[in-house]
Amino acid sequence: MDNKDINVEKSTEPVPFFIHEGVITRLIECNKRLLIALIVAVVALLINNIVWVVYEGVVHGNERGIVYEQTSDT
């Protein structure tokens, strides 16, 4: 790249407002969809964790007991 290319000013036309509004509207709709997807994913993870904790409590809950041994010294 030459220094000449950097210093050359390009003439750009301003973007019409209705095009800008259309792009912003699309971004807002996309952000709403992404927010809904995020909420669904978080709820799914919470439900998964709750189910896993309940499963572990039901399946392995009865096996956790303290075993006492008595020794007779007689």
Image (spheres, rainbow, N blue to C red):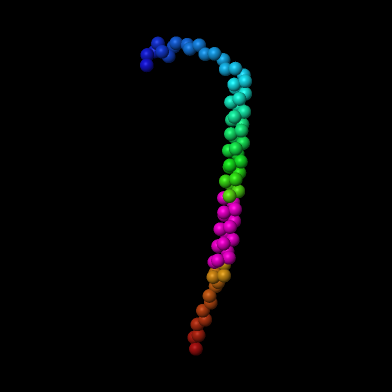
Residue at the image position 58 percent from the left and 65 percent from the top: 58
Region rendered in magenta = 45-60
Image quadrant for the N terminus?
Answer: top left
Q: Position of residue 2 (x, y in %)?
A: 37, 14
Say if 34 sits above or below 3 in the image: below
Residue at the image position 53 percent from the left and 77 percent from the top: 68
The front one of 69 and 17 is 17
* Residue 16 in which image quadrant: top right
How many numbered circles does the render carry? 0
Residue at the image position 57 percent from the left and 46 percent from the top: 41
Q: Is residue 71 magenta?
A: no
Q: Position of residue 25 (x, y in %)?
A: 62, 28
Q: Position of residue 5 (x, y in %)?
A: 41, 13
The front one of 3 and 56 is 56
Say if 41 sits above or below 5 in the image: below
Q: Position of residue 47 (x, y in %)?
A: 59, 53
Q: Judge left or right: residue 20 versus residue 9.
A: right
Say if 69 sits above or below 20 in the image: below
